[in-house]
Amino acid sequence: MNPVQKVSSMLPNPLTRPVRVLFVILCLALLVAAALVACDRTVTRQKMRIGYMNCNSEQETVARFGPLTTWLSQQLEIDFELVPVDTQEFTERFNAGEFAFTHSNPLLYIILKKEKQLQLLATEMRGRYGARTAGSIISRKDSGILTLDDLRGKRMMFGPQLAPSGYLAQYNLMLDAGIDPERDLAYYAIPQGSFKHEKVIYSVYFGQYDVAAAPSLDLETMIREGKISADDFNIIAESPIFPYCSFGAAASVPAELASRFRQALISLTPETTVAYQGESVKVLGAAWIDGFDPLVDSDYDLLREMAKKANMPPYQEY
């Protein structure tokens, strides 16, 4: 029995055959229309890109944030694409319109907020300071370098110049202590390649440099992972805490979408999972994040003051 005959046999007897056939045709037409609407929705689903600042390497960035990006796509019904971006290229590529959403360190947020009115969405929480972080200046335990004044004439390794907890915070600590890194250090350098923050810490550990600008979170993480011991170093100074890595949205992103993106991030718990590459993955665990905090723009003012004192973007004067 064909489909028309099957449906016809289910109709009340009082209907004439022409009426029954017309009814079946109408039902089939409605089914086809519904299928076309569903297909049209699939074809027109919005596509957007999220630029993620590389921390240690591009490969690590993709592995960490792939599950989160997939989860956001499901929650917001938008096909998000993960775009790993080198820190030094981040503002240029954002300005070129390569991505509408950002995940970056707080200094890049401040730059894009001032220059492009970037919308703050949420700040990630990690480690003992939660949604905030700090920068430390360290020396080897046996070095005899114990105070900021001891830095004069020493060789120092900084992190990348746009790293607030690996460069700016320590530079500011020294300026506040009356030490000019450009004049009072014997020499300073910035590492190349990937895993720069670990290289900074190891440069002191293996005696290549006298002191280093270490992100407090990286010290905490490397100690927890057994790569180093807290007994290996002197913590000469630690900066005040300031916001950690943050999500942002371009000014062109509608406020309603930005709000839904923010709420999705804040709703994440350690138990939230997503199907990713054939496995059920914990979204926050994969990203090394404890959760998200809806900080406000004024929470970043301390970092702005640091950047102004250090003549750093977006306030640099040549």
Image: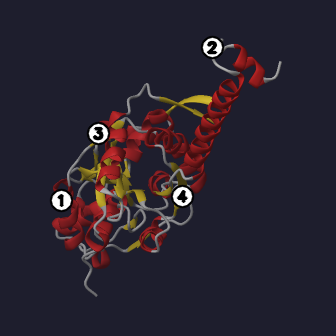
Residue in view at x 36 percent, y 41 percent: 265
Give the SS element for disc 3.
loop
Q: Earlier in the sequence, mark 4 or mark 2?
A: 2
| Pointer 1 residue | 302
Give the SS element for disc 1.
helix
Q: Residues within 10 Å of mark 4 (few under 14, many from 20)?
A: many
Residue in view at x 50 percent, y 45 percent: 69
Mark 2 belongs to which amino acid?
Pro
User: Which residue is nearer to you in this view: 152 or 56?
Assistant: 56
In the depicted structure, whether residue 276 falls above or below residue 205:
above
Task: Give the foreground label among 1 and 4.
Answer: 4
In the rendered image, residue 131, in percent from the top left (x then y), is placed at 28, 43
| Pointer 2 residue | 14
Q: Residue furthest bottom?
A: 318
Q: Quadrant of the N terminus?
A: top right
Q: Quadrant of the C terminus?
A: bottom left
Q: Earlier in the sequence, mark 4 or mark 3?
A: 4
Mark 3 belongs to which amino acid?
Gly
User: Would residue 216 appear left or right of 305 to someone viewing this image?
Assistant: right
The answer for how far apart the CA atoms under marks 1 and 4 are is 28 Å
Give the SS element for disc 2.
loop
Quadrant of the image occupied by residue 172: bottom left
Give the SS element for disc 4.
strand
The answer for how far apart the CA atoms under marks 3 and 1 are is 17 Å
Task: Give the foreground label among 3 and 2.
Answer: 2
The answer for how far apart the CA atoms under marks 4 and 2 are is 67 Å
Q: Earlier in the sequence, mark 3 or mark 1?
A: 3
| Pointer 3 residue | 130
Task: Give the foreground label among 4 and 3.
Answer: 4
In the rendered image, residue 141, in percent from the top left (x then y), is placed at 37, 47
